[in-house]
Image: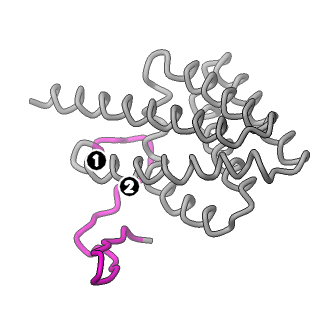
Amino acid sequence: MGVLRIVPGKGTWVREDYIQPSLGYGLSWLPGHRDDVMLLFELKETLEKKAAGLAAERASVEQILEMAGLVERLAGAVSMDDLDAMVEADGAFHAAVAGMSGNHYLVEVLESVERVVSAVRRSLVEIPGRPARILAEHRAVAAAIIARDGAGAAEAMTRHCRHAEEEISEYVRSIEQQRS
């Protein structure tokens, strides 16, 4: 798995100069890859917005019930302050929304992006107050999908992704300032 370099009118190549960060709880690699991570978050936002809108239109009742269960699983993890369970439930929710889109290409691309940005998820749940905000944002996305409101689901997912981008950007800035 690699990161692609796209040059309009010329082609697409796998970047050979990109060093895949180790995906784990240690995020010492993050400040050195901040620009790449933020670019991937921009892509993730675009894709997840579309996935949420399509999910509202296409999801089966069974898929919606599964998604609702994932939101409640996140709620339980937040109430228990179980960071590992929060990370897992958050990832499962996003994967479920993508799956509900009914677009297997969208799912594949999101899975590829997720492989890189998933390491950031642990940092997000460690930010004071962020787990409760993640839960509220997931509930807003789920409510719009349940209401079959494609535009509302897309808007709620966009807000959720932007909040994550803003908070991880601030997190990286604080690490960089500490190192200075």
Residue 59 x, y percent position in the rendering: 81, 50
Crowd tier of the residue under label 1, counting other residues whose Cα lies within 10 Å: few below 14, some 14–19, many 20 or above: few
- Residue 143's quadrant in the figure? top right
**Quadrant the N terminus occupies:** bottom left
Give the residue at mark 1. Answer: 29
Residue shown at 65% from the left, 40% from the top: 151
CB-based contact (under 8 Å), mark 1 and mark 2:
yes
Q: Main secondary structure of the magenta part?
A: loop
Taking the image as shown, residue 83 lies to the left or right of residue 149, namely left
Q: Which mark is residue 22?
A: 2
**Distance between the Cα atoms at labels 1 and 2?**
8 Å
Nearest the camera: 86 or 135? Answer: 135
The stretch in magenta equals: 2-30
Crowd tier of the residue under label 2, counting other residues whose Cα lies within 10 Å: few below 14, some 14–19, many 20 or above: few
Residue 19 x, y percent position in the rendering: 28, 64
According to the image, what is the colour scheme of the structure?
one colour
- Residue 141's quadrant in the figure? top right
The reply to whether the magenta stretch includes residue 3 is yes
